[in-house]
Amino acid sequence: MNFLSLIEAKREGKILSPAQIQEFIRAFTAGKIPDYQMAALLMAIYFRGLDTAETTAFTLAMRDSGDVLKFPKDQRPLVDKHSTGGIGDKVSLPLAPLLACLGFRVPMISGRGLGITGGTLDKLDSIPGFKTLLPAKKIIEQVQKVGCVICGQTDRMVPADKKLYALRDASGTVPSIQLITASILSKKLAEGLDALVLDVKFGCAAFMQTKADARKLAKAMVALGNECGVNTRAILTDMNTPLGRAAGNWLEVKESVACLESLVGTRSTASQTLRPDGDAMERVPTDLRQLVITFAAHLLVQTGKSRSLAAAHKSAEDCLDSGAPRRKWDEMLAAQGVDLKAFNRKLALDHTAPVVMKLESPVAGFVSRCDARIIGEVIRDIGGGRLTKESAINFDVGVDQMAKPGERVEKNSVLARIHAADQAQAKAALVRLKTAFEISSKSKQPAPLILEILS
Ligand code: URA
């Protein structure tokens, strides 16, 4: 293959054939194309784009660059959810066991966070003993036996994306809709799914900041997922405000368990029902519960397990409230190496970071802004996120008890609590955290969480 001629062809806006794409992805994965040449092709793609057939070929070639999970035949459909990422986005944690209880198999291969966006694997790493790196054989065994697994990609899955993503990161070519689509879907297609639901976020803390860009990405992913034989839907959701009331790895695990305990849980293992100053605060954040139920409901409809979205919502809600997904969560944790007694002891603690400080409202009024980007930056800067891929994470730090837009607060009500490693960091974080909140005298309806569904 003359790779230089492919770079030149794309530079001139020509279409590459599926055979050419398969060949260069194979050669690049095998180390036969130097990074500088591949970076040049990526830049040409960034400016010239890929058409639908090219994007499909690119995605399938990346999927086939390594192992594709092969599950035994079974009446339970294989499903997953992917989120483009946001602050406090812990939906995967309660969703996987809920889906398993609804009669699905869930091979949820997840990633780590970078920058302000948290990663599901980092949240799970805050659970002592939880194993996130599993060989393909164990992933398949656990999915067949327990119904769900949440773990990282094995070294042998989609190696082309791993290499290409690192190069895109270093060459300023990440924000190409076609490359993002191919990158995300190649990994999901390697799970061997029947149906997939995508949470495409827009807003100040989202990968796609505008609704228009999020819609463009969602449309491209839905079209390609369906083209590749996976029933795919996308839901556009707001990421101007954090999801739930907690952000930070361990604090999000706690809130996920509270969500799973919903109506049947015991208070001792859940997040608090009241703020320390006595203000009412629902035990399970309604936005988190809404997204968990919504994604489960869509997958029920997509796989023909429910005839209408209304019936699917009811099934998902009843199942969540039955307590079965909470027990399934324990089963998943035990299967992945967790000592449940130790986990429950940690869960019962109010905080695990050395210092907790409250941010109080200076006035009475209504919360009109709780800025997800600022909160994400604060958490990253106190060690809860990564500045570089190599940074170590402090799992215990974060923000909880966040007041959300539309809520009434009194003077000195708690707007949020910061969990930090020491006093100095907590104090500095509090100064910044203050700028994330706005209180106004008039009540205003918060923006809807779900903007639209693309199927
Ligand atoms: N997440 C991915 O997995 N790939 C991208 O290209 C962007 C976000």
Image (cartoon, grey):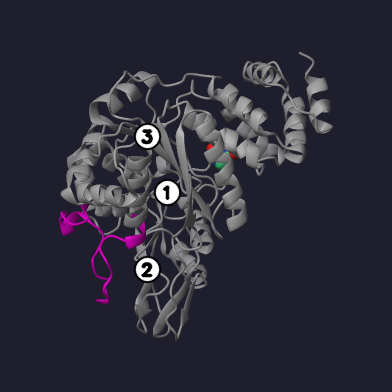
- Separation (CA) of disc 3 from disc 1: 31 Å
Q: Decide which of 163, 197 is in the foreground and name it.
A: 197
Q: Residue at x 37, y 47 (%)?
A: 295
Residue 129 magenta: no
Q: Which mark is residue 357?
A: 2
Q: Nearer the viewer, mark 3 or mark 2?
A: 3
Span of residues in magenta: 261-288
Q: Is 175 situated left or right of 242 in this image?
A: right
Residue occupied by mark 3: 79
Q: Which mark is residue 67?
A: none
Residue occupied by mark 1: 394
**Callout 2: CB less than 8 Å from ligand 1:** no
State which tag comes first along the sequence, 3 or 2: 3
Q: Is 288 situated left or right of 264 in this image?
A: right
**Which secondary structure class fits the magenta region best?**
loop
Q: Residue at x 69, y 15 (%)?
A: 32
Q: Nearer the viewer, mark 3 or mark 1?
A: 3
Of the residues shown, which amino acid type is indicated by label 1?
Answer: Asn
State which tag comes first along the sequence, 1 or 2: 2
Of the residues shown, which amino acid type is indicated by label 2?
Answer: Met
- Separation (CA) of disc 1 from disc 2: 17 Å
**Dot 1: within a 10 Å radius of its alpha carbon, few (fewer than 14), some, or many (20 or more) residues?**
many
The picture quadrant where one finds residue 211 is: bottom right
Residue 407 higher or lower than 304, as above or below? below
The answer to whether residue 444 is seen in the rendering is yes
Question: Where does the image place residue 120, in percent across and percent down from the top left?
Answer: 41, 43
Q: Dividing the image into 4 quarters, which one contains the N terminus?
A: top right
Residue 323 higher or lower than 54, as above or below? below
